[in-house]
Image: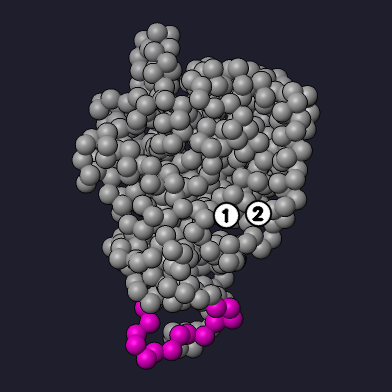
Amino acid sequence: MTEESTTYDRLVHNGRIVTVNGDFDILDRGWVGITDGRIASVGQLAEGNLLPPALHTTDARDGIVMPGLVNTHTHLPMTLFRGLADDLPLQTWLQEHIFPAETRHINPETVEAGALLGCAEMLLGGTTTCCDGYFLEDVVAEAVQAAGLRGVLGQGVIDFPAPGVPDCSRNIDQALAYVARWQNADPLISPSIFCHSPYTCSAETLQNAKRAADRHGLLFQIHAAETRDECDRIQAEQGVTVIRYLDRLGLLDHNTLLVHGVWMDEEEMELIARRGSRLSHNPQSNMKLAAGIAPIPQAIAAGITVGLGTDGCASNNNLDLFEEMDAAAKLHKVRHLDPTVMDAATVLRMATIEGARAIGLNGEVGSLEVGKQADLIILDGRRASLVPIYNPVSHIVYAAHGGHVRDVVVGGRLLVCEGRLMDMDLEGIMARVNRIADAIRSGKNGP
């Protein structure tokens, strides 16, 4: 059909369109036409021309229209532990607080409530795709599905009893059962396998999990080289650094997502680039846990695909990827004493198209281009802290935060309108989480 005869399902118009396409086109007075959940056209309204017809229209009101954000590392149910144990070293935080709290309080009911809260928080903050890893991920997937988000969702694997897997000898079987249910079950959900770390999983577990992921063509996720203690431990036990150890086990390839990568040397980054593995950068979690500063400018220069992640709410303590962009840009500038490092366009790519590439979805999301899924957000251009707009990319990275998100569309479906969730009972979800928090606070077992 010609453009004149096309009636779109939805038309988003009257905005500054930041496409994040290959040419990084920015269109003033732009519009996006959506049909059957995909982007059918991206255009710019010439003076005196009429908008094309559509069944539904959304006026961006001079706001910024951009791809939905891609959060490459989350633990959604850990919204339950937001602020539970702050200002502690990672191992103290994990061993003395988080792992015991998970043992006492993580079950299908609490995972559902925490995951739903995480989904609501992400949608309201402009994240349309997340890459998650946790226990009882079957329940997480149901929550993500109910919320309408897009997700690459990994069943957690660890070598000690965990929620949903009391017998850790069956951890891979449990992961495969989860995969069997969700692979090809919903176009928004992509199952994955997530090994916690090289120090909580044996070499046998790591290799078996990776083989299982490869057999099914899935993303394999793992925390790696997060802290100096982890690196010292692996060096002492295995005689090599963390990244070299993972490579020795055959874990590094284009279907592997390494999370954190704080402690990597130049040769290791070149190795990761050669193998085609990707990296999730979580600057605020790394800062809060004093893990260190990942060498991200060097990793990008080496040719590694790097996306941005928030990590879980217990170590961040929110899921606002706009704040993560701001932190990533500024942290590396001060680390290198160079204001040109990690410029706004580079960081925006990390939160959109590079994040999508890191989790294997760059053909579907991460930019506003014809044929891709219609995952987009609108930033309210009438908010005082976003006025005036000289450079919308600068605004996205340095001025915006999740509270500026006005509308959110995932797969052509309007999920947030004027800052309100369309299909989620936020008050009810928060009430459930607060009841769980009361039990956690009291030290009692159960919800």
- Seen from the viewer's position, the closer of residues 202 and 327 is 327
Please tell me the numbered disc located at residue 208.
none
Q: Which residue is mark 1?
A: 123
Mark 1 belongs to which amino acid? Answer: Leu
46 within the magenta span: yes
Which is nearer the N-term, disc 1 or disc 2? 1
Task: Spot the residue most to the front.
Answer: 384
Q: Quadrant of residue 419?
A: bottom right
Residues marked 1 and 2 touching at CB (< 8 Å): yes
Q: Is residue 283 visible?
A: yes
Tell me if residue 162 comes above or below residue 434 in the rendering: above
Q: Which residue is mark 2?
A: 147
Where's residue 154, x and y in %? 58, 37
Tell me if residue 48 comes above or below residue 74 in the rendering: below
Which stretch did the figure color magenta? 44-57
x 38%, y 30%: residue: 261
x 34%, y 66%: residue: 389
SS of the residue under disc 2:
helix
